Amino acid sequence: MRFIFASISGLIFGFGLALAGMLNPSKVQGFLNIFGVWDPSLAFVMGGGIIVNAIGYYFVLKRDKPLFAEKFAIPTTKNIDKNLLIGSAIFGIGWGLAGLCPGPVISNVLLQPEDALIFLIIMIFGLFLGRRVRIESTDTE
């Protein structure tokens, strides 16, 4: 049952990305190009996502536990450390250069496999490399 609801959620999310034009790298690059021909439409996509998420968060957290888990997995750390800043910067640079972030890349593998597949492979390698660096830096401390 958990798999079915996760799949339905993923399909809705993917459909929303496609409908909003988020599978098109030039759409994202147009939003990030504040000194050129700026496309503010991504701000409306983000705003809509924040509103829907906030409403859902409000109602979901009134429950004692999630439907398909023993407890809620809500981050408790509120520290802004160097790993967060460096990781965010690397993510933002990659997003700006490619015009894609991880969610749309997975959807784009079906639509534009020649471009998205290369990015997906490099992204997976980067995740693996980041995990290795984090494990090694934790071991030395």
Image: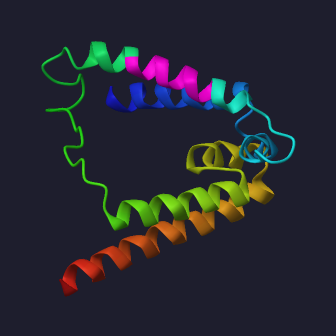
Q: In this view, does 84 lie above or below 18?
A: below
Magenta-highlighted stretch: main secondary structure?
helix
Q: Which residue is rendered at x = 54% and y = 65% of the image?
A: 90
Where residue 129 appears, as percent x and y from the top left, is 45, 76
Q: Which residue is rendered at x = 65% and y = 23% of the image?
A: 44
- Work out whether residue 141 or residue 16 is closer to the camera in this orientation and state it: 141
- The quarter holding residue 94 reads bottom right
Q: In this view, does 86 lie above or below 44?
A: below
Where residue 27 appears, as percent x and y from the top left, is 78, 39
Q: Which residue is rendered at x = 48% and y = 18% of the image?
A: 51
Q: In this view, does 106 lie to the left or right of 4?
A: right
Residue 15 seen from this side: no
Where residue 86 appears, as percent x and y from the top left, is 45, 66
- The quarter holding residue 121 reads bottom right
Q: In this view, does 112 lie to the left or right of 51?
A: right
Q: Is residue 5 above or below residue 36?
A: above
